[in-house]
Amino acid sequence: MPHCNKHMLSFFLTTKCNLCCLYCYNANERNKLTEQSLSFEIAKAGIDWYFANNDCRHIRFYGPGEPTQEFELMRKITHYAKHHINDGKRVTVEIQTNGVFSKEVREWILNNINIAWLSFDGMREIQEYYRPLNPCYTDIFNQKTSTDIIEDNIDWLNSNKTSQNLLIGARVTITEKNVCKQKEMVDYFYDLGIHQIWTDPLFSSVGNLPVCMSSKKSPHIDLNTYVDNYIVAYKYAQKKGVFWGSFLCINFDGESPYHCRSCTPLSAPHITTDGFLSACDMVLTGNEDNHMKCFLFGKWNEFTKSFDLYQDRISALNNRKSTNMKHCLSCPVQLHCGGYCLGETVNETGALDGKNSNICETIRKLYSDIGQNYTYDYLHP
């Protein structure tokens, strides 16, 4: 099923975070802000609006900080959605979390969450290099490291699951330190009891200018090295009953001219901490007037107590598809790529119809080796 079919309402809960990830793509933006969290009033209105206009009843909690840092707000939103008069009984809940949370939070996750993706980069020496605990939280967690806390939470959740419909998966950022250790990471996650893993190659952080216009060097990994090691790990994982996915392959199990949910914003809106409607996980607040503002397609109106929609931006996003872009028309994987990630494309090139030649070649190489997949059990976070 193409990733654009993952319909849901996402809540960007808070800018607070208990880790200090070296590669965080929104750290610069967050550091300019006074800490802020989504208002419950706006969250409730978002649920009312979304449920009135969509048959989907899937909600999701995400950054720009760590969503469990606003635990009470997350509980209130979940309760409101699950008890909503408009078919709330069908509500399912997903979270992308860094996995560093308390015993109280994990008990609630066990009983209230259906899909928990843990942003987790693998073995201890990798995880603790890139995703160290924020020093402000070391006393709270009794001097434990992020690895200690995550492994303990995963073990507890897996040990206490009975009939709960809860997936515990991992979302791994691939960097120079783990790109050649993908097969090793399959074993690591398997031993932890995690059998659903999505890998994402490191991408450029969002700045004031598109990467092509910035003098700042962007972090990257060698994509040929990533692909060679990914294919080995993917085939090895299959033999162990593990899914080792790649963000570059999210549409290999179906056909669509769209790459992901960003191109269909009304089906998968994200409510930001400051009350905007965003189409993309890379656009987490509405305060920056930069090249990424094309993803902000609405805003909470305090006077009318409703969301004002920007129809021109919605239309532009809906029209961004591989069947409309010249550089995609003759591509053999046109309908298994959809023009690649819209957020990364705009951040890299400054254009909705931009092209990243290296990514194009990489996706074609992956598809020629792996081919069209069986339908994924769980779509990318």
Image: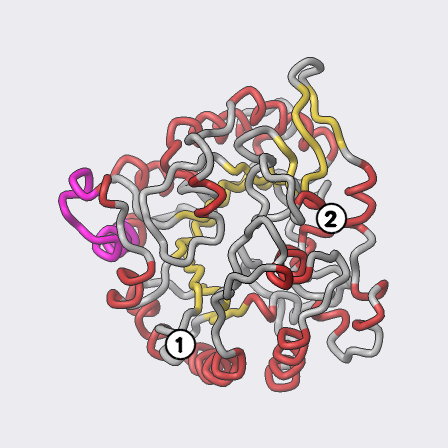
Q: Residue furthest top?
A: 303
**Between residues 290 and 111, which one lies in front from this camera angle?**
290
Per the rendering, the mark at residue 182 is 1
**Left or right relative to 181: residue 356:** right
Q: Earlier in the sequence, mark 1 or mark 2?
A: 1
Q: Which residue is mark 2?
A: 264
Q: Residue at x 61, y 53 (%)?
A: 209
Q: Height in image: 225 above or below 208?
A: below
Q: For residue 238: magenta?
A: no
Q: Is residue 1 visible?
A: no
Measured as percent of width and height from the top left, residue 363 is found at 64, 76
Q: Secondary structure at mark 2?
A: loop
**Between residues 82 and 270, which one lies in front from this camera angle?**
270
**Between residues 43 and 203, which one lies in front from this camera angle?**
203
Q: What are the residue bounds of the magenta stretch?
A: 138-156
Q: Which kind of residue does numbered mark 2 sit on?
A: Thr
Q: Residue furthest front?
A: 215
Q: CA distance from mark 1 to mark 2?
A: 32 Å
**Left or right relative to 151: residue 9:** right
Q: Residue at x 36, y 54 (%)?
A: 21
Which quadrant is home to the N terminus? bottom right
Q: Which kind of residue does numbered mark 1 sit on?
A: Gln
Per the rendering, the mark at residue 86 is none
What count of labels does the image hold? Answer: 2
Q: For residue 145: magenta?
A: yes
Q: Secondary structure at mark 1?
A: helix
